[in-house]
Image: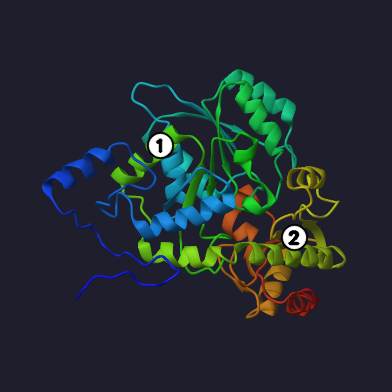
Amino acid sequence: MKKREINSARTPVYRDSGFELPTAGTTSGAFVSETSHEREPDLYIYSRYRNPTVVAAEEAIMAVEGSEWALLAQSGMATIDIALSIFQEAGRTNKWLFFSEIYGGTLSYISSVIERRRGLQVSFFRPSGTIYDYDLLERMLAEVRPDIVYFETISNPLLIVAEGRRIISMAKNYGAMVIVDNTFATPLLWKPLDDGADMVIHSATKYLSGHGNLTAGVICGNDRKLMQDAIEYRKFVGHMLSPDDAYRLQTQMASFELRFRQQCDNAAGVAALLQASGEVERVLYPGLDTHETHATALELTGGRGYGAMVTFDLAGTTPKAKRVRRDRFIAAVWPDIRLIPTLGDNHTILMPVEAVWGAKYPEPGMIRMSLGFENSDLLAPVIRRGLEN
């Protein structure tokens, strides 16, 4: 069959494990060029190195993030492993500072891999209630002198908004590299690279894909050396996204802005509804002026939105009463709102905080809700039904 160009506007799904190289000389040149770890090679060799469908999806994310490069991996945790591992060198004594209010999987990775298996020194900066004390952060930076500072723009599940620009500036004053997990805020609300962050991580499973039907992670940056180190590590460890998932992610990225704006609007509406209810003791949502980091969120995002997550605590006189109210709420909103342990889905979903986080957040009546982009008029009756049961 004669090979010919197909007049499609979409990048094909290249499922090749290896790519054809016409001559021995070409092969030699391709492998020599591969050692420079370019974002897009002149000749593809092997899909664990680079794949054209994956590269096309990375370029779609670069356009949204405004970054010089983006590298996809098979999960958000894989990108965290890449981002942190490239700073580990034999004989080097690493001192890393992490904010304590980060994804539980990241905390487990720090404990199990970074500390127990790799023996690195880690310090944690903890909030005072639901706000960060930046004078304390300054003292910690001066004392620890970390190589890396790692934080999330909006914490999970208390939705504490960090003063991102201030943190980056402070960390840079002490010579630290800065990695930001921007999954909850997305590039629509803030672009940390524009304010001096060295790398930005997203669990692309969440809002970038937005349909709850694939897992992926992405690292974005502007520094060429970091990119080359990340490509090399991803290649040797095998943290490559499949071309099929990359293709679907690229198509889903086309609607990212529309989807996330609707999700933010839905979250604002639900937060207001919950705050007005006598059945709810507390609502944690950065868009409400009752949230302690509301002013920070407004300054950081410029009012473009406050995210698509709402955490609330149902009223009750005792822990047992709160658990009963929680369980009744979850049962009453089903099947319109389901208990699914993730976020960023196209449909609104929820997760009971105590059941997942245990002793860290022992709040029996607390529920974290991830708003979807369904018609907002359909959400209010469902939530009222849950509150009235």
Q: Residue furthest left?
A: 24
Q: Is residue 65 left or right of residue 57?
A: right
Q: Quadrant of residue 81?
A: top left
For the point 72% across and 60% down, the residue is 310
| Identity, as a three-letter code, of the amino acid under mark 1 | Ser
What residue did someone put label 1 on?
85
Q: Is residue 32 left or right of residue 238?
A: left
Which image quarter is the C terminus in?
A: bottom right
Residue 124 image point, x, y percent = 59, 33
- The residue carrying pointer 1 sits among few (fewer than 14), some (14 to 19) or many (20 or more) residues within 10 Å by Cα, namely some
Residue 233 image point, x, y percent = 35, 40
Distance between mark 2 and mark 1 Cα atoms: 36 Å
What residue did someone put label 2 on?
312
Viewer-proximal residue among 260 and 346: 260
Secondary-structure class at tag 2: strand
For the point 75% across and 40% down, the residue is 131
Q: Nearer the viewer, mark 2 or mark 1?
A: 1
- The residue carrying pointer 2 sits among few (fewer than 14), some (14 to 19) or many (20 or more) residues within 10 Å by Cα, namely many
Viewer-proximal residue among 326 and 79: 79
Secondary-structure class at tag 1: helix
